[in-house]
Every structure is written in structure tokens, then in C-alpha cells.
Amino acid sequence: MTDEAAVLLRISVFGLAAAAGYWFVSYEPLGTAGFLVLGAGPGFAGLYLIVHQPMPAEPLAGRLRRLAGVPAPEPRTRVELADDDLGVLPHPSIWPFALAVGATVALTGLVLGFWLLILGGYRRGGRGRLAVRGQPGATPRPPRADVPGQR
């Protein structure tokens, strides 16, 4: 069983259990039907993945571990992160936070008033002065001496 199938089956079990609980608490058919659809849709998709994806033979304990969501045991060998090239990392910046605040103010402006929408659009456009301006771009990692071709 693949991880995707296990996640879909867990969602399905939750949806079916929530449908049963919701029905006995509220006796409301529309919400119960919604929970049943939440249980049936991923359940069919998970069963389809189990039936149609070729998988190597796996012991029952491994399948149950995967269905329960327990991670696989750690490999015995140690892997050093220094051996892997992690790529280019961006500078720390306040701009994601500033953009989130601007978007929040702009969307709140749709409800509360046009002036707040304009203020949020101004902040989201990057013209606001409340955010600290950082340098755009990224800093490459320093070259490693043990890798040929890097200076």
C-alpha cells in the first residue's frame, strides 16, 4: 500500500465516522450527506490506488504501519548534510509578512470599507514604509574545497 492510499483511507475513515456521529447528534441530512461524500470519495480513490498500483510484496506489519501513519524506521547509515549541495538560500526578509498584512487589510477592506481596501492595496503593492527593505536576491553558498571545479 502506498502512502497516498493510506492517507486517502484515513480521510475516508474520518469522514464516515464523522457522518455517523453527526447524524446521531443533529439528525440533519445535508451535513450527514456531506460527511458521507467526504468518506466515500477518498475511500474509492484509496481503494483504486491499492488495486491498480503495482507494489512489491510487503509484510502485514509494514502495511499496518503505513495505514496508521507511523513513519518508517530510520536507516542504519548516517547521512551528512554537508555531503549534499543544498542550493541557493534567500536572504531573510520581512516582505512575506508585509505582503500577508497588506493582503489581510485589503481583504478586510472588502467587508468594512473601500478606504481599507485602498490602504491594503497600497501596503500589498510594496510601497508601504512600515516594512524594512532588504536586498532582493539570494546568497550562493561558498564554494567547497573538496569538490573539483569549484573555486
Image (cartoon, grey):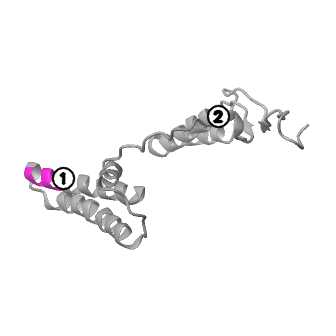
Asked whether residue 17 appears in the rendered view, the answer is yes
| Residue at the (25%, 60%) spot, across then down | 39
Residue 43 shown left or right of residue 130 in the figure: left
Classify mark 2: helix, strand or loop: loop
Q: Is residue 134 above or below residue 9?
A: above
Residue type at mark 2: give it.
Answer: Glu
Classify mark 1: helix, strand or loop: helix
The quadrant in which residue 132 appears is top right
Residue type at mark 1: give it.
Answer: Ala
Quadrant occupied by the C terminus:
top right
Q: Which residue is mark 2?
A: 80
The quadrant in which residue 91 appears is top right
Instruction: Give whichever of 102, 80 is nearer the camera.
Output: 80
Instruction: Give whichever of 33, 113 is nearer the camera.
Output: 33
Q: Is residue 12 above or below residue 150?
A: below
Residue 82 shown left or right of residue 9 in the figure: right
| Residue at the (27%, 58%) spot, across then down | 12
**Most frequent secondary structure within the magenta stretch:** helix
- The answer to which of marks 2 and 1 sits earlier in the sequence is 1
Q: Write down the region rendered in magenta.
A: 17-24
| Residue at the (29%, 55%) spot, across then down | 60
Q: Which residue is mark 1?
A: 17
